């Protein structure tokens, strides 16, 4: 493991280059990911996230060397996940994780959770993340995931923290409640969208206020240590880096608890922020 990327940040940022707003072409994304995996900051980077729709249509053929590790994003629906996984085999690609939405906003997530858990039971230890809307049925879905995990299934939760509409950005209190709910169930979680920078900030173009990924890290550390929702929400809402960086700095060499990480269409942006905040020992060209 690199001494420049602390253990706390290992695998924090999955490579979501092909997803908005990056929208990188697949050949470019595969080439760039190969460079990330051999760079000095490689320990920070998780798998390359690829949509099932691209895998099913054979878009990887001829682009990869055997041994590529990806995260499969189920944009084709739960029913076609087995087909997408099977399509990886001829290319020698391995899926480290599978992530899929189990319901639309306002729908009951329980049937989707049950279907995804059954799918996880047919896999050989591949991590499976159920993306659950932060609306109707959330806590029941978390209970169902916790029961499946207690039965030995490699399932966990995933939540959306941004997007193209204001309602896709949970408030600090809403996100804090979800983090604390996962803590109470000993349930790992992933996040997706909106986490472009380390510290909470307002995007001048859209007017949306984005969560900071170091805010989330500090908030999760506090939650695991027993903080209640209001204290966790204060850390998520903080815009002063000093409030959130020191807790992460003090735990640099500890394993990151509960939060599995998040996908970013840029690796350079979070890495630059981490160097600037002194959480990664940088000083190299990105």
Image: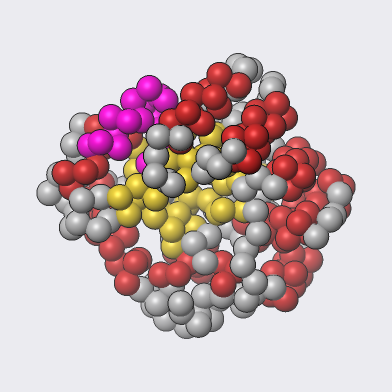
- The stretch of residues the image draws in magenta is 71-87
Give left or right: position of 166 versus 37.
Answer: right
Q: Foreground: 33 or 120? A: 120
Q: Residue at x 72, y 30 (%)?
A: 139
Give left or right: position of 78 versus 169.
Answer: left
Vertical relation: 198 (above or below) 23: below
Vertical relation: 229 (above or below) 58: below
Q: Position of residue 76 (x, y in %)?
A: 36, 26
Q: Position of residue 172 (x, y in %)?
A: 76, 44
Can residue 188 be seen here? The reply is yes
Q: Position of residue 177 (x, y in %)?
A: 78, 40
Q: Position of residue 145 (x, y in %)?
A: 62, 34
Give left or right: position of 253 versus 229.
Answer: left
Q: Foreground: 18 or 37? A: 37
Q: Foreground: 127 or 180? A: 127
Specify the farthest residue to the top.
Answer: 107
Q: Residue at x 12, y 49 (%)?
A: 62
Give left or right: position of 129 versus 257.
Answer: left
Q: Is residue 44 magenta?
A: no
Can residue 167 be seen here? The reply is no
Specify the farthest residue to the front.
Answer: 151
Vertical relation: 209 (above or below) 222: above
Q: Residue at x 34, y 67 (%)?
A: 37
Q: Residue at x 47, y 52 (%)?
A: 264
- Dividing the picture into quarters, in which one does residue 35 lie? bottom left
Q: Foreground: 88 or 204? A: 88
Specify the farthest residue to the left.
Answer: 62
């Amino acid at each position: 493991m690199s001494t420049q990327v602390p253990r706390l940040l290992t695998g924090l940022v999955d490579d979501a280059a092909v997803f908005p707003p990056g929208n990188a072409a697949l050949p470019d994304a595969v080439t760039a990911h190969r460079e990330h995996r051999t760079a000095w900051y490689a320990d920070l980077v998780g798998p390359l996230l690829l949509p099932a729709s691209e895998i099913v249509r054979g878009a990887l053929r001829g682009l990869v060397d055997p041994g590529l590790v990806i995260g499969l994003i189920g944009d084709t629906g739960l029913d076609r996940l087995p087909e997408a996984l099977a399509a990886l085999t001829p290319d020698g690609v391995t899926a480290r994780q599978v992530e899929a939405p189990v319901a639309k906003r306002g729908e009951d997530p329980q049937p989707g959770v049950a279907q995804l858990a059954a799918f996880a039971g047919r896999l050989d230890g591949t991590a499976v993340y159920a993306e659950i809307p932060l609306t109707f049925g959330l806590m029941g879905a978390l209970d169902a995931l916790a029961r499946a995990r207690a039965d030995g299934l490699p399932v966990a939760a995933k939540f959306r923290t941004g997007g193209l509409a204001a309602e896709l950005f949970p408030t600090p209190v809403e996100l804090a409640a979800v983090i604390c709910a996962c803590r109470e169930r000993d349930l790992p979680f992933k996040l997706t969208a909106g986490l472009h920078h380390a510290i909470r900030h307002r995007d001048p173009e859209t007017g949306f206020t984005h969560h900071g990924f170091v805010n989330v890290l500090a908030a999760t550390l506090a939650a695991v240590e027993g903080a209640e929702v209001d204290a966790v929400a204060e850390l998520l809402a903080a815009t002063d880096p000093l409030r959130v960086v020191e807790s992460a700095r003090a735990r640099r060499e500890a394993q990151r608890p509960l939060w599995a990480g998040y996908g970013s269409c840029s690796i350079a942006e979070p890495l630059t922020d981490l160097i600037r905040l002194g959480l990664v020992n940088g000083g190299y060209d990105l």
